[in-house]
Image (tube, rainbow, N blue to C red):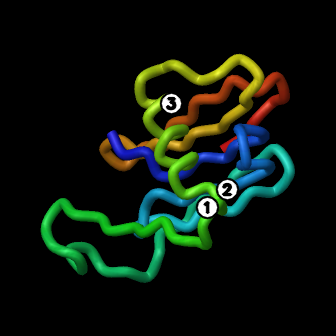
Amino acid sequence: MNLIYIYVDNYKILKDKEITLSSNYNVTRCENSFIINDTSISDGFYGYNLDVISIFGKNGSGKSTIIELITLILSSKIPLLTEVVCLYEYMGEFYYFTNKSEFITV
């Protein structure tokens, strides 16, 4: 299972942020809907079963907070007041997890 995208409403310094975690897919958010498209990067570009992404920015921009949030999501310990939408890919099928109160479509 591959976590490919996170939308976070409010977590520490991260406010209304989209976090892309896969170079294989482009995710576009339109209000409460998400559109997932393949990228133009060919299979095996980075090597077999390898995907490369980067997180960069100025000091204080939220890089460590993103890593912390990913860790919390993967361990099912999302803080109560933090709303997230997570998109996963597993064997060519897409799934989502959300704790948002609004309806989401993928």
Residue type at tag 3: Ile
Q: In which quadrant of the rendered image does the N terminus lie?
A: top left
Q: Secondary structure at mark 3?
A: helix
Residue 53 to residue 97: above or below = below
Of label 1 and label 3, which has the lower sequence position? 1
| Residue linked to disc 3 | 73
Q: Nearer the viewer, mark 1 or mark 2?
A: 2
Q: How far apart, in angstroms, are the residues tagged by discs 2 and 3?
A: 15 Å
The three-letter amino acid code for the residue at tag 2 is Glu
Q: From what the image shows, is residue 20 above or below residue 70? A: below
> 70 left or right of 79?
left
Closer to the eye: label 1 or 3: 3
Residue 8, given in percent of the width and then of the height, sits at: 70, 43
Can you tell which mark lies on residue 89? Answer: none
User: Element at badge 2?
Assistant: strand
For this rendering, which residue is in front, 12 or 30? 12
Residue 87 in which image quadrant: top right
The residue drawn where x is 56% and y is 35% is 96
Q: Which residue is mark 1?
A: 27
Q: Nearer the viewer, residue 101 or 10?
A: 10
Q: Could you say where residue 81 lies in the image, as x and y percent from the top left?
A: 77, 23
Circles 1 and 2 in contact, beta carbons < 8 Å: yes
State if disc 3 and disc 2 touch (CB < 8 Å). no
- Which residue is painted at 79% across and 50% down in the image? 16
Q: Is residue 86 above or below residue 44?
A: above
On the image, the x and y values in percent for residue 103 come to: 81, 30
Evaluate if marks 1 and 3 touch, with contact meaning CB atoms under 8 Å apart: no
Q: Which residue is mark 2?
A: 18
Q: Residues within 10 Å of mark 3 (few under 14, many from 20)?
A: some
Q: Secondary structure at mark 1?
A: strand
In the picture, which quadrant includes the C terminus? top right
